[in-house]
Amino acid sequence: MSSAKRFEQLALPHQEAAYNLAFWLLRSRPDAEDAVQEAYLRAFRAFESFRGEDIRPWLFAILRNTAYRMLNTRRRAANVISLDASLPGLEPENGAQTKIASDTPSAEDIMIGEAERDLVRMALAELPAAFREVMVLREIEGLGYREIAEITGTVVGTVMSRLSRGRNLLHQSLARKIGKDRSHAL
């Protein structure tokens, strides 16, 4: 089998997850698409050096480096970038809704679910980049601690610490947001 075919078989199934990670890192759909395209090109060019069984950590590490390179370039160009800025384009009409399988939910259930997902998305977007990154890799992409450590260039203990701190920050943010929503309703 040619290396191009092997790369296609191993890497392409992870394209959607790669885009998801890039989007959470870069906070822009066009930038995420560019980062995934560039990362896949870099991975393809370096594929001969791939010596592993699972391509996902290797590919995501390339994607992560590509995304951070893009952020640094953007930061230099703009001279300032806020990693805590709100995410543009996360409104439901822009297709950012997550599809949840269920039997036949009521309209009320659908609205409540959308509101809850929006709150979680906003709270996740507000996390500092290091915490948001490991939260997305673990909770959304379902990667293991070792894979995340390999992708982020850290040790498992750091991943666990960032996950714990990220979860606490997410919980605090959600508690504040829910409290504000309830106070506005009164």
Image: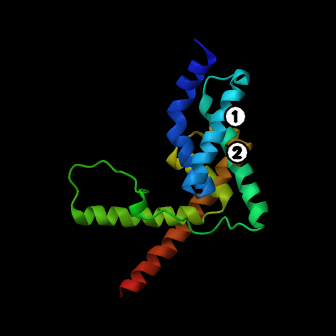
x and y, in percent, of residue 175 in the image? 49, 72
Of residues 7 and 121, the one nearer the viewer is 7
Using a 10 Å C-alpha cutoff, classify the residue at mark 1 as few (fewer than 14 neighbours), some (14 to 19) or many (20 or more).
Answer: some
Using a 10 Å C-alpha cutoff, classify the residue at mark 2 as few (fewer than 14 neighbours), some (14 to 19) or many (20 or more).
Answer: many
Q: Are marks 2 and 1 in contact (CB under 8 Å)?
A: yes
Q: Which SS class for mark 1? A: helix
Q: Is residue 56 above or below residue 123?
A: above
Q: Residue at x 45, y 78 (%)?
A: 179
- Identify which amino acid the numbered label 1 is placed on: Arg
x and y, in percent, of residue 97 in the image? 40, 56
Q: Is residue 101 above or below residue 2?
A: below
x and y, in percent, of residue 76 in the image? 79, 61
Q: Residue at x 57, y 47 (%)?
A: 33
Q: Is residue 75 above or below residue 138?
A: below
Q: Residue at x 42, y 85 (%)?
A: 183
x and y, in percent, of residue 102 in the image? 27, 49
Quadrant where the image shows the N terminus: top right
Is residue 114 among the parts visible in the rendering? Answer: yes
Q: Which mark is residue 42?
A: 1
Quadrant assignment, res 155: top right
Distance (Cα) linking label 2 and label 1 = 9 Å
Color style of the picture = rainbow
Q: Is residue 71 above or below residue 1?
A: below
Mark positioned earlier in the residue sequence (2 or 1):
1
Is residue 142 among the parts visible in the rendering? Answer: no
Of residues 16 and 171, the one nearer the viewer is 16
Quadrant where the image shows the C terminus: bottom left
Q: Which SS class for mark 2? A: helix
- Identify which amino acid the numbered label 2 is placed on: Thr
Q: Residue at x 44, y 57 (%)?
A: 96
Q: Which mark is residue 66?
A: 2
Residue that protrudes farthest toward the bottom in the picture: 186
